[in-house]
Structures are given as C-alpha cells and as structure tokens.
Image: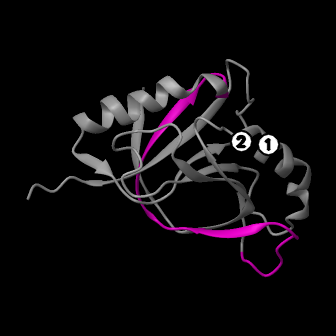
C-alpha cells in the first residue's frame, strides 16, 4: 500500500460519538444517526467526513476485540459557536501522521489496518502516538463499493532508542 507522511494542523470537528468495541461494532448505528443530521451543521469546512477513533494508550498492545474505544462521525468546522443539539465538539490535535489510501469496500478494510499496524509500523522508524486515528471519507468514498476510496490517518512519532 502506498503511503505518505503528513504533518496535520489542528482541526475543529463537530459530530456524534459512541462508545463501542470491535466485537460490538456500532459504526452503522453511529453513521445512520449522523448522516441525516449533518446538514444541521452550518459552519462546516468542505464536504469531507471524518470517521475518527480515540483509543486508550496501549490499546493495541495485547489486542482484545472487546476493549472499548470512542468512535466519531464528524465534519470539520470553522468554530464551535453553534452546535446542533445532541452533537459534540472535538479538537483534533495536530501532529505527524502516516496516511494510506485505501481502495475497497469499507467492510473489507480490516486487512489494510492489520498491514499498517502489524507490518508497516513495526518495520518503520515510527511508533504509534497517542492521538486520534481517523479516516477521511471524501468525494471518492462510496461505502461498500469495491472502487470506494478513503484515506487512513494513523498518528505516529519517531522511535527513539533509549
């Protein structure tokens, strides 16, 4: 998989969130609730959607599919002046990310993540950083279409030998 290293600037996001695990995946429920309401967000920047995950530190060490994390369906906004009811805000901190372009059905993405975290990362000069992971669902995103495209953003930092 092709990748690039990016320095992300801080972003303001507005959307909905849910607590879930990989074993109790509530992604459909989250997006099914968010999509009809996203037009209520009047100060969005662009049309990209953010599918974002906040994991506890060391979440992927001794991986357990029942461990819970926070998942977001969101859009980037200019400010937090007007927040629709039952929506939340999140400031996505800036920092270093590795970005992979994933092509395929959303439900078939697990091997891509396994490659990134299990093969690419251990063989790189980077380690995971404790910041949100996210996917940008842009114009070419078509959910379950095999030609669908999305960007996978994984927070990294240089590995420092001690």
> Looking at the rendered structure, which numbered label has been put on residue 26?
2
Circles 2 and 1 in contact, beta carbons < 8 Å: yes
Q: Which residue reaches farthest bottom? A: 81
- Residue 79 percent across, percent down from the top left: 72, 77
Region of the chain picked out in magenta, as a range: 79-106
Q: Nearer the viewer, residue 64 or 40?
A: 64
Q: Is residue 143 left or right of residue 37?
A: left
Q: Reply above or below: 57 against 93.
A: above
Please tell me whether residue 90 belongs to the stretch shown in magenta: yes
Q: Secondary structure at mark 1?
A: helix
- Tell me the residue at 41%/36% (across/down): 3
Q: Residues within 10 Å of mark 2 (few under 14, many from 20)?
A: some
Calculate the distance from the C-alpha at mark 2 to the C-alpha at mark 1. Answer: 5 Å
- Residue 5 percent across, percent down from the top left: 38, 47
Residue that numbered label 1 is attached to: 29
- Tell me the residue at 77%/47% (across/down): 30
Q: Reply above or below: 40 against 121.
A: below
- Tell me the residue at 74%/56% (across/down): 46
- Please state, as top left, top right, bottom left or bottom right, where the N terminus lies in the image: top left
Picture quadrant where residue 2 is located: top left
- Residue 35 percent across, percent down from the top left: 85, 48
């Amino acid at each position: 998989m092709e990748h690039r290293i990016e320095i992300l600037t801080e972003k303001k996001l507005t959307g909905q969130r849910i607590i879930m695990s990989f074993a109790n995946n509530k992604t459909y429920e989250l997006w099914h609730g968010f999509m009809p309401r996203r037009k209520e967000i009047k100060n969005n920047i662009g049309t990209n959607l953010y599918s974002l995950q906040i994991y506890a530190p060391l979440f992927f060490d001794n991986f357990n599919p029942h461990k819970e994390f926070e998942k977001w369906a969101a859009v980037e906004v200019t400010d937090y002046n007007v927040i629709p009811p039952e929506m939340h805000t999140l400031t996505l901190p800036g920092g270093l990310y590795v970005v992979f372009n994933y092509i395929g059905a959303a439900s078939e993405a697990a091997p891509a993540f396994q490659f990134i975290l299990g093969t690419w990362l251990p063989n790189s000069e980077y380690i995971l950083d404790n910041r949100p992971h996210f996917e940008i669902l842009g114009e070419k995103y078509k959910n379950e279409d095999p030609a669908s495209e999305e960007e996978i953003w994984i927070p990294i930092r240089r590995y420092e030998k001690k």
